[in-house]
Amino acid sequence: MLELDQLFKNIYLWGENLFTQWGIPLFWLELLGMLIVAVIILAFMSLSVLFLVWWERKVSGHMQSRFGPMRTGWHGWLQTIIDAIKLILKEDTTPGTADKIGFLIAPIIVFVSAFMAYICIPFGKGLIVKDLNIGILYILAITTFTVIGLLTAGWCSNNKFSVLGGFRSAAQIISYEVPLTLSILGVVILSQTLSMQSIVNSQKHIWEWYIFRQPIGFLIYLVAAIAEINRVPFDIPEAEQELVAGFNVEYSGIKFAMFFFAEFANLFLVSAIATTLFLGGWNGPLLPSWIWFFIKSFFLVFVIMWFKWTFPRLRVDQLMGFAWKFLLPLAFINLILTGLFA
Amino acid sequence: MNIVKRTIDGIYNLLKGMKVTIRYFFKPAITLQYPKERWTMPERSRGMVGLLSDPETGKLNCTACLICMRNCPVRAIQITQKKDEAGKRVPDEFVIEAGLCIYCGICEESCPFNAIKMIPKYEFSTYDKKQLTHKKERLADIGKGSKYNKWS
Amino acid sequence: MENGTQTAVFYILSGLIVGSAFMVVSLKNIFHSALFLVLCFFSVAGIYILLSAEFVAAVQVLIYVGAITVLLIFAIMLTAQLYSPSIRQSNEQVIPGIIIVGTLLIVTLSVLRRTSWRISTQGIEGQSTVSIGKSLLTTYVLPFEVVSLVLIAALIGAIIIARRE
């Protein structure tokens, strides 16, 4: 079978042999391994982001009876690569009145928090960088840094639209984090573990998938997650029609590219978490486990894009009211029911 | 139980919207890939102005009566007359400023000899404004192959 | 992990904590102070991980970085005339301050020296998350419930204050 975990294990064993032959302490091998894994994850993220941006444009195009990008390569598959090169080569400007340091570190914070969360995603059988025993809690914790980054970006741009966008995104993310966490708690109660691999292992057969035992939890998770990553219908932080572009008004060039990158990396992250928690992760017949994982994740990504090109944007008060008055009580009811019948 | 009913109604309506978008997702796109694909213009659409000529002799139908020139609301047409060997009146110079033309079609309607016509051709943008001054030869070239249509 | 690496990581994290905490109180720009506070909290979470208390570390990041600092930044952003000269960083009452802080330092140091610290050589058995959950709902169930009651009271109080009509 095409399982990749044996491959990585063999590479590691080969490296161990080599290092013991040369008489270098294994500590350095660990360090080198960490570096290589980080590079692999970064490369994977870049590839998936490039693909997702193209896919998003194609989906939006076809849903509006258009084609989307068509000119560069077959059906425009080179388009995002060219866009990325253009963004990287573009002049990197900083507004004169901006807070220089904050303006610089804001995209880095957002980018790094998206990157660090990928450590705990089980891409396949044994394909996880580090199976922490607090897995899902770690992801929830590390992604909260996004708020700090967005607030910093909004504040340090010294622009009224940016500040409003930062405010809105912070309020929204904090509000929707509560139902998000509560919906995940239902799964945690059922599986009795926080580790991602154990959660996947507890849903081997299709009737054990938590989407069937936690349908309300899945819906709450999906809605709250879309709000967490600032996508339509919850994209008021960067509502183009009212705030120009929200917190990233002043950004251009590579800093803007980092925000954009983080946004799409988070889109995939959210789908991957939903796959792991509710759709059985990498479990599936016939095909290798990692292919199953990508099929499920990209299907969820497609669903989220489908939402984006169907629904109109919510108003600010509707958004907050929906979180606190509807999703939160529903999540609590779901949690209580799960606790009673688990 | 109002909230339950409203929730179910809301989800139903959202799903209805999603049904519409997914149907359009699988429908073929209506976009025309313009330089590769072109739309055939309808016979009576008003495009470039051209001069019609007799298909047998190849001579212009125009008799330089100046009616179109007088009727043109933006004065885009300039004609000078001359006599040919047979003593017939023909246009010496026939100039249409395509940049001035407003595609009203009055020249075509007023012409008593079926000599001038709005041809369903487009794409005559140039890098140089001078090339928008269409001379007699160019106009005859544009009108080549077009027939006079009674109803247009 | 080797012992030497652990010690090195401990000193790096401690340096980060002390340095960023110092920056929090000494920086002129209050927004930068808030950002250094984030760094400080994050380094504390690193110390927790070093003590193999991952759950506490995650909760530290989740609550202190994700909620409390964001609240602080909100407060900073909503403050009118943040950069006006009327907001002073230094205190005029230097002598009482020195006396109070010095007393506090002496008291803390003497307590630290007199306490006999028990040093455990073995780590926590099993997952710390499980043991924390079990002890919260068995041994410490009363404090746990009291804390939740206090939090609910605070929540209701906040709503009542905000809804003054």
Image: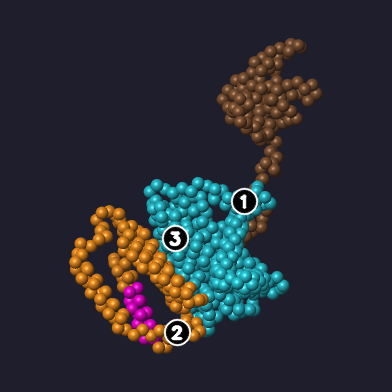
- Disc assigned to residue C121: 2
Which chain is orange in the rendering?
C
Quick check: marks 3 and 2 in contact, CB under 8 Å? no
Residue at the spot x=24%, y=71% of the render? C101
Kindly report the distance in space between the C-alpha atoms of the residues bearing marks 3 and 2. Answer: 39 Å
Residue beneath the point at 19% across and 68% down: C96
Q: Amino acid at mark 3?
A: Gly
| Residue pointed to by mark 1 | A79
Closer to viewer: mark 1 or mark 2: 2
A41 displayed left or right of B89: left
Magenta span main SS: helix
Image location of residue A278, percent across then percent down: 57, 73
Q: Are marks 3 and 2 on the same chain?
A: no
Q: Looking at the picture, tell me which residue is in the foreground, C95 or B92.
A: C95
x then y, percent, for residue A159:
39, 51
| Chain A shade in the render | cyan
What is the x, y in percent for residue C137?
Answer: 42, 86
The answer to whether dots 1 and 2 both sit on one chain is: no
Image chain in brown: B
- The chain that hosts pointer 1 is A
State the residue position of label 3.
Answer: A149
Mark 1 touching mark 2, by CB under 8 A?
A: no
Nearer-the-camera pick, A164 or C75 = C75
C131 in relation to A292, above or below: below
Residue B21: mark: none
Q: Which residues are magenta?
A: C140-155
- With respect to residue B100, does A68 lie above or below? below
Q: Residues within 10 Å of mark 3 (few under 14, many from 20)?
A: many
Q: Quadrant of residue C10?
A: bottom left
Q: CA distance from mark 1 to mark 2?
A: 58 Å
> Closer to the camera, C118 or B73?
C118
